[in-house]
Amino acid sequence: MDSKYFDYLQSKKWRKKKLKLKRSVNHKQCMVCYSPKKIHVHHLTYKHIFDEKLNELNFLCKKHHAQIHDIIKEMKIFGKEALAQLRQEYQREILIKSLKRR
């Protein structure tokens, strides 16, 4: 991403957009683990960057926000496909932890 994008993320316009998203839903929680802590707003697409639609944004905790960007970078998949991959990896992680507890 270029400096214009990073400047945008610091802008009043982006803060207003995030606030509008937060007000539009009852549960501000990660779309993967459902944690309400350390919530970030993630772009599912950059198609309308600087004029995003609310349905192009979602909530992810700090950990899963970093992980989805790793998935995007490594697997070259985006949007809902990347989110589905992240959810699948999370479910696998939960399953492995539960099996280890036995």
Image (cartoon, rainbow, N blue to C red):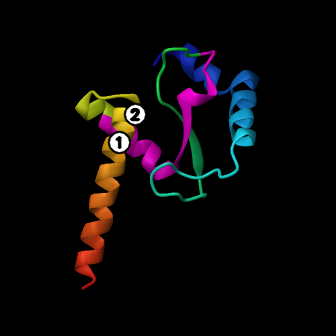
Decide whether residue 47 is among the magenta residues: no
Find residue 81 and report its horizontal and vertical position in percent: 34, 34
Residue plotted at (36% across, 49% down): 87
Find residue 48 and report its horizontal and vertical position in percent: 55, 14
Task: For marks 1 and 2, give the CA distance.
Answer: 6 Å
Decide whether residue 64 is among the magenta residues: yes
- Mark 1, residue position: 84
SS label for mark 1: helix
> Is residue 70 shown left or right of residue 26?
left
Please say if 100 is above or below 58: below
Find residue 57 and report its horizontal and vertical position in percent: 56, 32
Please say if 14 is above or below 32: above
The N terminus lies in which quarter of the figure?
top left
Please say if 99 is above or below 55: below
Range shown magenta? 50-71
- Report the amino acid beneath label 1: Ala
- Report the amino acid beneath label 2: Lys
Label 1 close to label 2 by CB (< 8 Å): yes
SS label for mark 2: helix
Quadrant in the rendering for residue 99: bottom left
Q: Within 10 angstroms of label 2, few (less than 14), some, or many (20 or more) residues?
A: few
- Mark 2, residue position: 80
Q: Within 10 angstroms of label 1, few (less than 14), some, or many (20 or more) residues?
A: some
Residue plotted at (24% across, 85% down): 102
